[in-house]
Structures are given as C-alpha cells and as structure tokens.
Image (tube, helix red, strand yellow):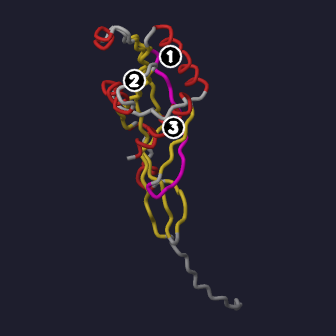
Amino acid sequence: MSIKAYDDAIINEFRKVFNSNVIHILPVENAVRFLAQLKKDNVEFPLVSTTRLGFSVIGSNVNNNAKMIGSFAKREDNNNIYAQSIPIRIEYQLDIFTVDRESCDDIARELIFFFYQHPSLKAHFEYGLDFDHKFNLFINDDIVDNSDTVEHINNGVMFRNTFTFYTDDARLFRSKKQMQGEIKRDVELMDKED
C-alpha cells in the first residue's frame, strides 16, 4: 500500500536525526516492550516512539482525471504507464520518553524546530512507477505532557511528552498501463485539375 512509503520516509528521516537505526513506527504501548526485545531488556532513555494513527481520503480534492486516467509517468516498451492517485491525509503521534522533565522538554523543542525547518520529505513508490513524491509534515498545535500516565506512576521515573503531526499532501498511488496508440495515415497526392 502507498502509505508504507510515507512511513518509511519518516522512519529514515528520524534515523538520520537521532543517529539511530532503532527507529520504528509502532503503537506507543508496544514501544518500550519492542525496544526491550531488540536490546535484550536493556532499554536506554531517551526513547522516541512514532505511531501512525490512521489516514483519510481527502474527497474534496479528488481529481477524477488523476483518479481514473492518471498522469503520464513513463513509457515502457510499447506501453504508456500512468500514475493514478487519490489525495490522503495521514496522522501520526510522536511520544518522547525520558527519565527527567528537562530532557523531555529539550527533545520536544529540538523536534519542533526540526519540523518547522525541514518539513519536506520524499517517499519512493514502486508499483511499476518507480518515482519519488515530495510531501510535507506539519505539527498539530498541542504538545501534551503524558507523564501522569500509568507507566510513570508504576515506574516512577518516566516522563512523556506527546504531540501529533500529519501530512495532507500524501497520495495513494497505483500504475495503469495503456498500449501506445499508433497513428497511420494513408495520404494520396494528386494534381489539382481545373
């Protein structure tokens, strides 16, 4: 599905930002448990978890031509390949876990500046198309302090900031092949008689 290409682009960008290959998109409830399995129960903080909350079709922006026919993408053998697309909005949640409030706030601040200064990413699509699509990430206004959740009370040392972000210029893509047409002309030249 096209949505995974956006997830992969976000994961790759976060891996560069945090200089870590231990970045995955998974539900926040599983983040600490998943990391513990990867690190053999040696979870290190700070920990950043990203979750895709869902997606929706932006129906008011659906261009019937792009949906049904598609835009020309490339020529392959005797076929024209068209990229059919439908605009979507994808919502994500990002959680920052730390052992002290100051670190949690510092990481949130740096991430917010990063999003504002580098909002554009590229998602790569195969599906017979093999092209990149540029999209932007936007932060929703509220950053929520979730430190009073059960995890914090039980563990006593975990602070958590949560914010959501989204892209509303993502698209569902698929390819459509169409045989290249041929125009044949049979022209006969004649002298014009008076």
- Mark 1: which amino acid? Ala
Say which quadrant the C terminus sits in. Answer: bottom right
Q: Which residues are magenta?
A: 127-142
Q: Is residue 11 above or below residue 132?
A: above
Q: Measure how far apart labels 3 and 1 are at the Cα level.
A: 19 Å
- Spatial CA distance of label 2 from label 1 is 20 Å
**Residue 133 shown in magenta:** yes
Q: Are marks 2 and 3 in contact (CB under 8 Å)?
A: no
Which x, y percent locates residue 175? 44, 56
Q: Which mark is residue 108?
A: 1
Residue corresponding to mark 3: 12
Is residue 129 located in the magenta-colored stretch of the structure?
A: yes
Q: Given the image, on which type of amino acid does mark 3 rest?
A: Asn
Which of the marked residues, 3 or 1, is nearer the chain's N terminus?
3
Q: Is residue 169 above or below residue 73?
A: above
In the image, is 29 to the left or to the right of 116?
A: left
Q: Position of residue 189 (x, y in %)?
A: 66, 88
Amino acid type for the residue under numbered disc 2:
Val
Sequence-earlier tag: 2 or 1 = 2
Q: Which residue is mark 2?
A: 43
